[in-house]
Amino acid sequence: MKKLFYCLMLAAMLLTACGGAAPAATNAPAAAAAPATAVPATAAPATAAPVPTTNPDSVTLPTSSEGGKVVLWGWPTQMTRSLDEKGDDKFVERVKAETGIDVEVALIEQNILSPKIKAAFPAGTGPDLIATDFDVMGPYWGFMEPLDSYAEKELGADWRSKFTDTALTELDLVGQIAKKPGLALYLPGNMQVLGWTYYWRKDFEKAGIRAEDIKTYDDFIATCGKLKAAGIPPMLGAMHPASLVDYYQTLVEVAAPGQMEQAQVGKAKFTDPDMVKTFDFIAQIHKECLQEGAIGAETGTVFSMFHKGGDGAMIITFTGTPWFGFLNVEDAQTKANMRGEYATFLFPQSKGLAATDGGVAMLASSKNKDKAWQVLKWMTTGKGAERHAVNAGQPMAFKALVPGPTKTDFDKNLGEPLYNALTNGPNKFRRVLCVDVYNSLTKVIPGVVTGQITSEQAAQEVQDSFDRACQSWVQK
């Protein structure tokens, strides 16, 4: 295991994911671009469609056409880019040079991508490929082309054994949701683990805090108090859809251990008293740990503040493996911080979330399936995926892609615990179900934090979203 870990560490990128997700996180997520002093690889590339600020209907995306370019929809995350050493996106050029295939890429944020999916897929007017994650697709996985025959031809009959167990767990669930059990409706790309807190080692040392002593939620709140008493701002946070959902996914396991999995299949409710407490915890952390105005802060600005030092001892926004990308950003100080100044710990009493950050699927309606498969393969197992691993330090679902170590304290302080969390223990795939639940969480959490609605009202809105939109497709 140790040897495998040390094969996996190198450097450069981020998620928005999670979107999250950035919109992930979870997962993930796609994150807002950071300032010029610390630009993660999630800054929107030149090939991306402009991120709309008004009505999603105002954005027109290219669609599959027979004999035309392979059209890829996605959101601005690592899997949809291929960055050179200057941070410029070379995705289109590299696909052409290495596969001979012309590709057109349209990238928009997840919250805008969702309604586009909802309108296009049932009508058969979507792209050839979509790079996305579990939360956004929901029931629309059913419109994907099964990839088993393609994978068997290219990778052998045992092709599933060549991907990580966590990725396969998610892949199997997607097949069940789409009512196509046992079929692969996408191939997983890069992997992420969320729910891990980063901290400045020197701040903890100054305040006399040891991360290994933070074993309960109450211990975490007390840690914020100790940092304040030492004159150190405890924690930085930001407003991003994926970041908010990551908070929920992390803290629901503290408030109601194991209940999220039950709620996802209708055997528990978001309105159950212990589930409701999740919102109370989120509000408490914003009040007692985060900087003033965190619920409205821009993600890139907060990243820059954290890397600069002095504004927050801890951060949980898009932490875990998405942060590996900051190893190789242009800013020399950020690089140095990542290699030796930070360490990490799992949020106490939580489980963490290990999942595919970005998978790639082929639409059943694609008019260019053979070419689309070649691009999909390039992105998930080929040269494109290799660059994510080697140049960006990303753990990949395809086991053969293993970058080398940084030979710095990063390997010990951040890399090893995060990679171990990704592949071992309770840090397994869990999600918040369909996009309607995801979107509902991003709307109600700010209301709870600012005192505009109660935790009970927030939980009811989320449950209503589940009842309205998810019941018809979740496996009971």
Image (cartoon, rainbow, N blue to C red):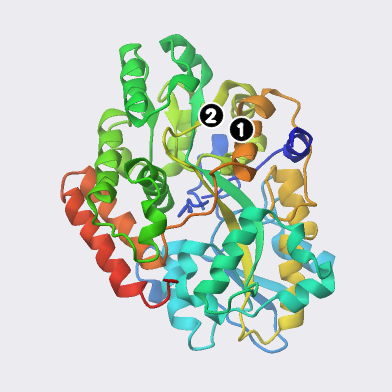
Marks 2/1 in contact by CB < 8 Å: the verdict is: yes
Can you say which quadrant of the picture contains the N terminus?
A: top right
Residue 170 image-quadrant placement:
bottom right
Residue 130 image-quadrant placement:
bottom right
* Vertical order, 420 against 156 (above or below): above
Give the amino acid type for the residue marked by disc 2 in the picture: Thr
Residue at figure coordinates x 83%, y 71% from the top left: 154
Q: Which mark is residue 344?
A: 2
Q: Can you give x and y, in whole percent of width and height, for residue 343 in the image?
A: 56, 25
Q: Can you give x and y, in whole percent of width and height, for residue 117 in the image?
A: 47, 76
Residue beneath disc 1: 417
Residue at figure coordinates x 61%, y 32% from the top left: 417
For label 1, the crowd category at 10 Å Cα-Cα, with few meaning under 14, some 14 to 19 and many 20 or more, is some
Residue at figure coordinates x 58%, y 21% from the top left: 341
**SS label for mark 2:** strand
Give the amino acid type for the residue marked by disc 1 in the picture: Pro
Residue 51 seen by the camera: no
Q: Nearer the viewer, mark 2 or mark 1?
A: 1
For label 2, the crowd category at 10 Å Cα-Cα, with few meaning under 14, some 14 to 19 and many 20 or more, is many
Q: Which mark is residue 340?
A: none
Q: Can you give x and y, in whole percent of width and height, for residue 376 in the image?
A: 71, 69
Q: Earlier in the sequence, mark 2 or mark 1?
A: 2
Of residues 425 and 340, the one drawn nearer to the viewer in this rendering: 425
Can you say which quadrant of the picture contains the C terminus?
A: bottom left
Residue 120 seen by the camera: yes
**SS label for mark 1:** helix
Q: CA distance from mark 2 to mark 1?
A: 8 Å
**In the displayed structure image, the side of residue 293 where residue 175 appears, left or right:** right
* Vertical order, 405 against 164 (above or below): above
Of residues 330 and 368, the one drawn nearer to the viewer in this rendering: 368
Q: Can you give x and y, in whole percent of width and height, for residue 368 in the image?
A: 71, 84
**In the displayed structure image, the side of residue 217 where residue 446 appears, left or right:** left
